Image: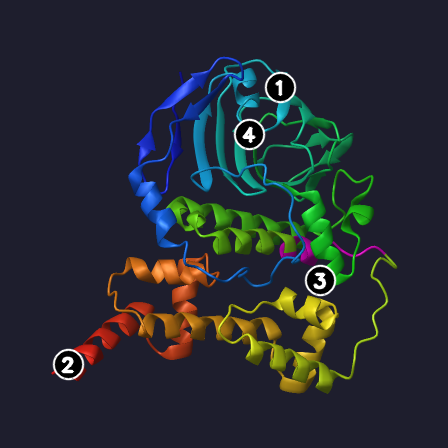
Amino acid sequence: MPSFAVLYADHSLRPTQHDKRTGKHRCHRSSPGQQFWKRLFTSATAELVGDRAMSTQAMPDHPFATDPAYSYTARQTPDADEHAACLTNWQQNYVQLTAGVFRGEFEEFCFDDVQLFREGLNQCVHQSGLAWAGSRTFGVPIAIEGGGWFGGEHYDASSLLTLANGQELNFRTPPRLEILACATNADALNRHAREVEHRDLEAELAGHSLVPCPPAATRAFTALLSTMFASLRATPEMLNHPQLRKALQQAIFNALLDIIPPAPGSAAPCVPPARQLLVKRARDYMEAHIDQPITIAELCIALGVSRRTLQYSFQEVLNLNPIKYLRTLRLNGVRRTLRHSSDTEGSLIADVAARWGFWHLSHFAAEYKALFGELPSETLRNQALSDQEKKI
């Protein structure tokens, strides 16, 4: 059998059991080490963090809700049928169309109602079937020889593919293909689009198998998914933070809103208040919630304006991007937490950063140093020295 394992929060690889009914492997239950990570962050009180937040409406049951909070699968496959069974909660059938030994690679992160996956194929394959109920899927080729067909439309390296909830998968790959994709809850994505951008994204995407966006937008989405994969491979235990999982979902949602051009007339009319007043209301909201991780979408929903309206107002009144302004507040929140911590271990930094929604640790460290003139580790060390001096 090919290699297959589930990576847990304590970085251990547990033995798996083969399910003859589904053809998949299932892992054993969580270990004491995983429970330690779970207990460590049950005290986190912020409901939503990240660059922007979700709607406060109740969410449907998460299709990937598990104990532990996430799963990671990496696998090499010698057969198209075996490869088709890799995607969690999908019903798929693969037919190899070109001659030769099949070699496939598969990688997947599942958490809450988000599924990130990468697959590579060395043969031309026809894929059919259905994604999990209630999902909307987006995919981008990152390595491709020639072109293929998706939903009856020709695609190439610059295409952004999408599969609607309940839509039959009809996917013919070229002889060589590597693709990055994400599947998420369609209703949650559309609700986010309505509340933050006043757009009906499902209506805009209706009838499209290829999203009508420029190649530069596709490259931006590819870069986002690639960065997410790299960060999660390096520190998968970040997914134990519910806030961090939400932040990743929000990053995907907002990236999609940025790269998918609005249909003519799709935005609902909005009559914002005077920009001076709007910025004052936004700052009042921030001050009232200064002890919480504040986000752009929270402001949009609370103030009843679109993200663009808020951005234009901040730019005109303060000559400052509101996203950067809020990021600065969050960095200050991290620094405040570090300065009041008695723990001097480096692992605390990643934990605190994740609690405040920073999932790309190298970018976080660079932004922290640019703002405060020192690395987070130096803040911890300097605070520890200061505490020792006070005791003398």
Labelled pair 4, 3 in contact (Cβ < 8 Å)? no
Circle on res. 196: 3
Circle 3 sits in a helix, a strand or a loop, which is it?
helix
Under circle 4, the secondary element is loop
Q: Earlier in the sequence, mark 2 or mark 4?
A: 4
Q: Main secondary structure of the magenta part?
A: helix
- Give the CA separation, mark 2 to mark 4: 55 Å
Question: Identity of the amino acid at label 2?
Answer: Lys
Residue identifier under label 1: 94
- Comparing 239 with 285, the one in front is 285
Nearer mark to the viewer, of 2 and 4: 2
Residue sitting farthest toward the left? 392
Asked if marks 2 and 4 touch (Cβ < 8 Å), the reply is no
- Residue 45 among magenta residues: no
Q: Spatial distance from mark 1 to mark 3, Cα to Cα?
A: 38 Å
Magenta residues, as a range? 254-263
Residue 10 seen by the camera: no
